[in-house]
């Protein structure tokens, strides 16, 4: 069981809760701060002071005073009116991560909500309830207002949940699990919807998947190196110590581990070729920079998921309430744009490598890796597919964070668009996986043509695992099932597991 306390959650925790049925509880250490902030909200209400979102409207309507007797209705109206997202629903794992992150932010004790509200969020996780949250509509400030409003509706028995792909009234789902809807108290509706939790949820899942994908990219690159009879000299540790970026050093060392004992590479150590193309020679420099970027994203997310991101914040000890801008998604918008750009570069390298593998003028291999001198087209069109995905990524990698459209009658006059950064990075990652699947297929075919020479320790394990599922391309067959099988092998982790079973840790 994971116990949240508002300060020690990790991205790995988020991924685990999002993708498993592990239960979550609230740490007792949080209770004093949560209760103190709640008590101060009630104190403010009793004094009938104008406090943003408690006794005033929100956004441009913040100059309108709301009397305490209408404070509860204000919270109800907020979540109803703000639940305005459109499009396909967010994936279940994203929604679960979002729920966890919202609960953790409220647990810090700066939001003025009841303990019961946080426990209700955790009930959604522990009962595996899947709120229906359309994906499009957040501008990333005041955080993810609209998608979080869809989540808040569920707590009150409004809105919908997804069960077996069907939309079911939330009230019905809560009743089935023995849960009673909450009636929101003053400040609670605003506390639920002000925050960056949707984009942070996607970000946590992305960095986990990006790290795994990058490991597969190295395996694919090492296989391509052998298929093209490249040299491992470019991975010499002395080169990378002379430019000591952490990622570059790490990737170079990994490449040497993967091709260790490669008879293919050893067979041409004294050939006339002076150096390889950049796509092979510069793998440490490019993939190393990707690794560094992913680690930077991880550090930003680790801070964000333990932050108070709603508004206003309640400082009970000092008896103060302050309106600020912690909901602004710019830190995440920047880093998610950066992550999408970095992931795109994996596909850029990979597709160019596929092109070299199928091009007989540079590969030394049969044209398009096909046998039959023109009768078979082999991997000709698979390279087209990789090129199309890479081109699509170039569009998706345009930073969403450079755009801003004023909202709320100009009161919210600069927004981050971070949720768009997050969704684009998701799409880029999925495209990159498909490109790597094509590279692995092509590289495995190229290694076949190097027989009887054997590949390296790590690449041999990967090649053998591929050939367990996907046979050598002897004559043309329907191509897309091979790509699908290869992509599923990457997703399942079986290629990486086969390599790591040889004692190679990437």
Image (spheres, rainbow, N blue to C red):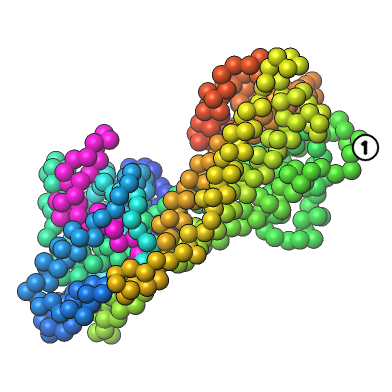
Farthest residue to the left: give it: 69
Q: Is residue 215 left or right of residue 81?
A: right
Q: Is residue 469 left or right of residue 61?
A: right
Instruction: Residue 500: give x, y in percent of width and height.
Output: 61, 37
Quarter residue 363 falls in: top right
Is there any visible trace of residue 480 in the rendered image? yes
Label 1, residues with CA under 10 Å away: few <14, some 14-19, many ≥20: few
- The span shown in magenta is 142-170
> At 69% from the left edge and 31% from the top edge, which residue is drawn?
443
Name the one closer to the observer, 106 or 29: 106
Q: Please tell me how many numbered marks the rendered image carries.
A: 1
> At 77% from the left edge and 56% from the top edge, which residue is drawn?
240
In the displayed structure, 268 sits above or below 132; it is above
In the displayed structure, 26 sits above or below 236; it is below
Quarter residue 238 falls in: bottom right
In the displayed structure, 386 sits above or below 293; it is above
Instruction: Residue 382: give x, y in percent of width and height.
Output: 61, 29
Secondary structure state at the residue bearing disc 1: loop
Q: Quadrant of the C terminus?
A: top right
Q: Is residue 91 left or right of residue 175?
A: right
> At 72% from the left edge and 24% from the top edge, which residue is drawn?
369
In the displayed structure, 60 sits above or below 161; it is below
Instruction: Residue 61: give x, y in percent of width and height.
Output: 22, 75
Instruction: Residue 483: give x, y in percent of width and height.
Output: 56, 28
- The residue that disc 1 covers is 272
Q: Is residue 472 left or right of residue 281?
A: left
> At 18% from the left edge and 58% from the top edge, which residue is drawn?
80
Query: Magenta includes 344?
Result: no
Query: Magenta includes 147?
Result: yes
């Amino acid at each position: 069981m994971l116990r949240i306390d508002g300060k020690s959650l990790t991205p790995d925790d988020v991924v685990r809760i999002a993708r498993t049925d592990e239960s979550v509880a609230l740490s007792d250490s949080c209770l004093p701060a949560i209760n103190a902030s709640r008590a101060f909200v009630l104190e403010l209400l009793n004094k009938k002071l104008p406090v943003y979102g408690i006794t005033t409207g929100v956004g441009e309507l913040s100059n309108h005073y709301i009397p305490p007797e209408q404070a509860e209705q204000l919270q109800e109206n907020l979540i109803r009116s703000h639940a305005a997202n459109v499009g396909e629903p967010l994936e279940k794992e994203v929604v679960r991560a979002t729920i966890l992150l919202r609960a953790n932010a409220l647990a810090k004790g700066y939001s003025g909500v009841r303990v019961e509200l946080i426990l209700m969020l955790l009930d959604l996780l522990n009962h595996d309830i899947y709120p229906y949250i359309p994906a499009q509509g957040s501008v990333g400030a005041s955080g993810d207002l609209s998608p979080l409003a869809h989540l808040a509706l569920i707590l009150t028995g409004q809105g919908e949940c997804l069960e077996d792909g069907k939309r079911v009234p939330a009230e019905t789902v809560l009743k089935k699990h023995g849960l009673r809807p909450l009636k929101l108290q003053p400040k609670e509706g605003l506390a639920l919807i002000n925050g960056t939790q949707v984009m942070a949820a996607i970000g946590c899942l992305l960095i986990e998947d990006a790290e795994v994908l990058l490991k597969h990219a190295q395996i694919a690159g090492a296989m391509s190196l052998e298929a093209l009879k490249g040299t491992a000299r470019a991975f010499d540790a002395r080169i990378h110590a002379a430019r000591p970026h952490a990622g570059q050093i790490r990737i170079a060392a990994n490449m040497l581990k993967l091709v260790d004992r490669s008879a293919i590479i050893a067979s041409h150590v004294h050939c006339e070729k002076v150096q390889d193309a950049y796509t092979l020679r510069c793998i440490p420099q490019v993939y190393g920079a990707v690794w560094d970027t992913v680690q930077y994203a991880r550090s930003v997310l680790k801070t964000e998921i333990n932050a108070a991101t709603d508004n206003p914040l309640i400082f009970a000890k000092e008896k103060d309430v302050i309106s600020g801008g912690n909901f602004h998604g710019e830190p995440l918008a920047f880093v998610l744009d950066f992550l999408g750009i970095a992931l795109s570069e994996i596909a850029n390298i990979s597709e160019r490598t596929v092109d070299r593998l199928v091009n007989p003028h540079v590969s030394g291999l049969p044209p398009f890796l096909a046998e039959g001198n023109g009768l078979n087209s082999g991997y000709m069109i698979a390279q087209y597919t990789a090129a199309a995905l890479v081109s699509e990524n170039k569009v998706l990698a345009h930073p969403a964070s450079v755009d801003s459209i004023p909202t709320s009658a100009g009161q919210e006059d600069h927004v981050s668009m971070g949720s768009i950064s997050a969704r684009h990075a998701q799409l880029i990652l999925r495209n990159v996986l498909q490109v790597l699947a094509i590279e692995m297929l092509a590289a495995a075919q190229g290694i076949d043509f190097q027989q009887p020479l054997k590949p390296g320790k790590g690449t041999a394990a990967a090649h053998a695992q591929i050939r367990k599922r996907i046979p050598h391309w002897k004559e043309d067959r329907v191509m897309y099932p091979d790509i699908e099988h290869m992509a599923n092998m990457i997703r399942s982790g079986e290629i990486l597991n086969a390599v790591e079973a040889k004692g190679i840790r990437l």
